[in-house]
Image: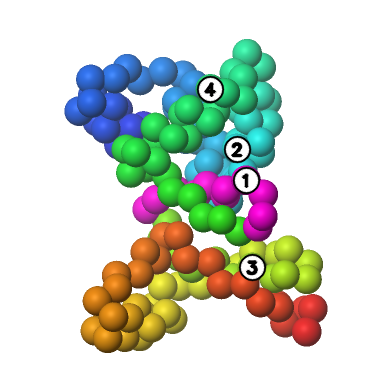
Amino acid sequence: MSDALTRALKERGLRLTAQRQLVLKAVRELGHATPDEVHAKVQDVASGVNITTVYRTLELLEELGLVTHAHLSHGAPTFHAADDVHVHLVCRSCGSIQELDVDAVTPLADTLLDEQGFSLDMGHLALFGTCGGCR
């Protein structure tokens, strides 16, 4: 984790800071997290890190290709590690989020590419519906 962050920052001439490390660590530990949830997790360790720093750091980490986001509700985006590529299944009834392997939607992605010339971004894919428990 820290090696990829250090390397990516160095390539851009940026410093490795404790705040950047803490935000990336929080995203990885939480799995799926809004900026507010990341902020709360970081606050457990470093109470001086403010929400603006978390937002800026998440933006930087996304530019560096270390985290990505998906819109899983009408609220803030949800961030997760970029190397954990999966499809999100979001229940409109209870709000639960399940992960689905990208292999399940690869035929759809292939069809979209072949027929429409459209390349599907699996890292941002969220499918909304009703989970088995709510059905």
Asked if the residue under mark 1 is in contact with the one under mark 4, i.e. CB atoms within 8 Å, the reply is no
* Numbered mark located on residue 76 in the image: 1
Q: Amino acid at mark 1?
A: Ala
Q: How far apart, in angstroms, are the residues tagged by discs 1 and 3?
A: 15 Å
In the picture of the structure, the residue carrying the numbered disc 4 is 53
Q: Amino acid at mark 2?
A: Pro
Q: Is residue 19 left or right of residue 62?
A: right
Per the image, is 80 magenta?
yes
Q: Position of residue 70 (x, y in %)?
A: 51, 55
Q: Residue at x 24, y 31 (%)?
A: 7
Q: Quick check: 56 above or below 31?
A: above
Query: Could you tell which of marks 1 and 3 lies nearer the N-terminus?
Result: 1
Q: Amino acid at mark 4?
A: Thr
In the picture of the structure, the residue carrying the numbered disc 2 is 35
> Can residue 45 be seen at all in this image of the molecule?
no
In the picture of the structure, the residue carrying the numbered disc 3 is 90
